[in-house]
Image: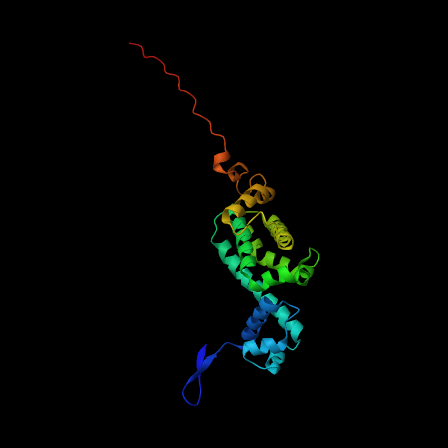
Amino acid sequence: MSAAVASDGRTRGVVDLREPRERILDATLRAISRVGVSGVTLDDVARDAGCGRATVYRTFPGGRDEVIQQAALAELQRYSLEVGAALDATDDLVELVTAAVHVTACFVAGSAPLRHVLANEPAAILAHVAFDKSPVVFAVAQEVLAPRLVRHLPADRAAEAAEWLARLGLSYLAVPNPSVDLTDPDAARHLVTTFVVPGLVEDGDGPSRDSLRPTASRPTRSPEPTAVTPSRS
């Protein structure tokens, strides 16, 4: 950004020097955060983006529908980058799946547009993420999750697991459980180790089932007493 200077030498605010497309998409997401999808108007978007309606239509010939669609895809791309970076920092299957669950929950909690829509216009998003209408979501799962899962699972099962995890994510998005806070990393790990990873691994794949149990829950065996043989003098 750069300060705009009037002819009298005084600063007249801040000029956003980013490309119109980026400014328009950001303005659209801000509008959705305030008034929801149904309340978005191109006049408001253009005003917030610092451009005219003509610029919006030149950038997005499809008008309002295209602007909203591209804004949603931009938010999805932001999610892909965040979760991808978190997954790349993991070393094993449990850490990877826990990171996927935790970062997804944090992203939903931190996305103002997504929070507003889920709270006030759930049909606007759930109609597009229903299990039989989610090609974009599943494509992201295959792009982001599958290549990382293949480090720990056979390739064919990694692709299947990526879609399965995406379906779990959609379920959480559609019907969140208020008693399970997946933004808490401990809660996310408990869910993953108890219910998710045991369904992904088979003998020889990834961690053993015993290793997924919390350490405190594993029974410990006392060492057997050692028999002492008296020495002969």
Name the quadrant of the C terminus. top left
Q: Is residue 136 left or right of residue 226?
A: right
Give percent across and percent down for residue 89. 47, 53
Residue at 54% in and 43% down: 190
Q: Residue furthest top?
A: 233
Q: Is residue 217 visible?
A: yes
Give percent across and percent down for residue 7. 43, 90
Q: Residue furthest bottom?
A: 7
Task: Specify the quadrant of the image occupied by residue 116.
Answer: bottom right
Q: Residue furthest right?
A: 132
Give percent across and percent down for residue 97. 54, 49
Q: Vertical placement of 31 versus 13: above or below?
A: above
Give percent across and percent down for residue 138. 63, 57
Residue 31 or residue 188, whichever sits in front: 31
Q: Is residue 188 left or right of residue 9?
A: right
Q: Vertical placement of 2 versus 220: above or below?
A: below
Residue at 59% in and 43% down: 195
Q: Is residue 206 left or right of residue 8?
A: right
